[in-house]
Amino acid sequence: MAYQVILPAAGLGKRMRAGKNKLLLELNGMPVLVHTLRVFEEDEACTGIILATHPQDDREITGLLKKYRILKVLNLVPGGDERQHSIYNALRTVKTDGIILVHDAARPFIRKGHIHRLAQKADETGAAIIGVPAKDTMKKVKDGVVVETVERASLWAVQTPQAFRISILKKAYERADQEHFLGTDDASLVERLGYPVSIVEGDYDNIKLTTPEDLYFAEAILEKRKRLEQGRQA
Ligand code: CTP
Ligand code: MG
């Protein structure tokens, strides 16, 4: 299933406390952003990458695109103050219909197989998101006191990518903009219009690099993948 992807990369990475955009930190000698870009650059089903960036990072990112030969990024779109605004700026540059994915540039461990299953599902249903069943017991808390233990079987931790028919996502973003609605993910904008959103089971490795300790998890995931790769070649 052919698709385009929007990669929001215009954040400041404040919680990472690195003094610069966390996407420019290196993992295994290569910036996080490049790890993510490569997944899509190397996926033949991906027809284009729309990258939303903060102007202060543009020079460095342009250099990286050249250095690592990322050819599917045609241009950089200026990000906004919120993730949702960055994505809306990117979405407005899309003139075709078809399937679009939105994927946090801060999740470098997404796998091609999951991307394909997600794009396929969105083509069938209009909207699909990736997630994993919740592992922890979840409780609703108010003013420091437990209100309720939520039944875990029905709870999923949702990640990106999230995939949509372009016409549906545009309508959802336009409506959110008109109504000043700020959602915590892309699907929530689509849900409030009453469209069903399907879920595709992904894996727990697809973490978002958010705080400094996530870098240790990232090293461990890379190490695991390297061992698996060596095992396959042996
Ligand atoms: N993002 C964006 N535009 C913004 C804010 C975030 O494009 N105005 C992007 C980030 O670059 C990241 C993704 O959205 O790839 C998820 O956001 P998050 O993990 O919160 O990253 P940051 O906003 O950079 O980090 P923080 O919230 O800690 O400052
Ligand atoms: Mg943020």
Image: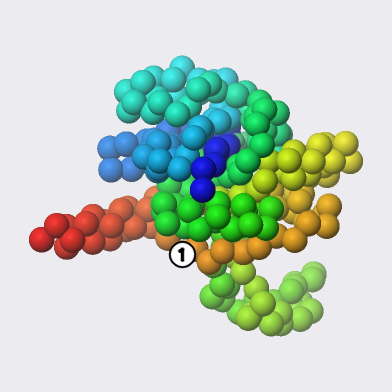
Q: Residue furthest right?
A: 179
| Ligand 1 within 8 Å of the CB at mark 1 | no
Location of residue 41 with respect to 201 vertically, above or below:
above
Along the line of sight, which residue is nearer the eye, 157 or 129? Answer: 129
| Residue 13 image offset from top left, x and y in percent | 54, 39
Q: Is residue 10 left or right of residue 191?
A: left
Look at 38% across and 57% down and name the residue there: 217
Q: Is residue 120 visible?
A: yes
Q: Is residue 84 left or right of residue 57?
A: right
What quarter of the picture does the C terminus occupy? bottom left
Q: Is residue 126 left or right of residue 113?
A: right
Q: Is residue 207 visible?
A: no
Along the line of sight, which residue is nearer the eye, 86 or 123? Answer: 123
Label 1, on which residue?
Answer: 204
Look at 75% across and 61% down and name the residue there: 196
Look at 51% across and 48% down and name the residue there: 1
Location of residue 59 with respect to 21 vertically, above or below:
above
Mark 1 residue element: loop
Indicate the quadrant where residue 156 lies.
Answer: bottom right
Along the line of sight, which residue is nearer the eye, 215 or 225? Answer: 225
| Residue 70 image offset from top left, x and y in percent | 39, 28
Q: Residue furthest left?
A: 234
Location of residue 200 with respect to 183 vertically, above or below:
below
| Residue 30 image offset from top left, x and y in percent | 32, 36
Indicate the quadrant where residue 33 lies.
Answer: top left
